[in-house]
Amino acid sequence: MTPLERLLLEEVPVRPERPGGGHSLWTQQEQDRHWEDLCNAVRRPGEKRPQQSEAAA
């Protein structure tokens, strides 16, 4: 199954809702776990996470 097919089947994890419906920043641990879940969903475990550009920071 290709990564696109997995996405179409909604197997790629999405950002979980926060209790209370508030919008807040993720902790580093939450970001790391989400990246790991995404990589596993597309069968690329251990993939290096892209660095945020300084322009976007």
Image (spheres, rainbow, N blue to C red):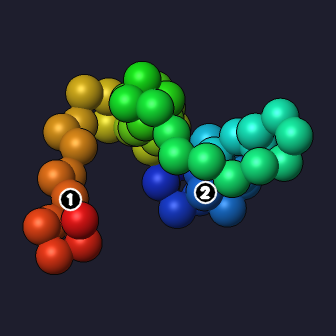
In percent of width and height, residue 49 lies at 23, 43
Disc 2 secondary structure class:
helix
Identify the residue shown where x is 51% and y is 39%. Answer: 26
Q: Is residue 10 left or right of residue 53?
A: right
Disc 1 secondary structure class:
loop
Residue denoted by label 1:
52
In percent of width and height, residue 53 lies at 15, 66
Badge 2 amino acid: Leu
In percent of width and height, residue 41 lies at 51, 38
| Quadrant housing residue 5 | bottom right
Res. 3 visible in picture = yes
In percent of width and height, residue 20 lies at 87, 40
Res. 36 visible in picture = no
Along the line of sight, the residue nearer the viewer: 39 or 34: 34
Q: Residue furthest left?
A: 54
Q: Earlier in the sequence, mark 2 or mark 1?
A: 2
Residue denoted by label 2:
7
Identify the residue shown where x is 69% and y is 53%. Answer: 23
Q: Residues within 10 Å of mark 2 (few under 14, many from 20)?
A: few
User: In front of the other: label 2 or label 1?
Assistant: 1
* Spatial separation of the CA atoms under disc 2 and disc 1: 23 Å
Identify the residue shown where x is 38% and y is 30%. Answer: 28
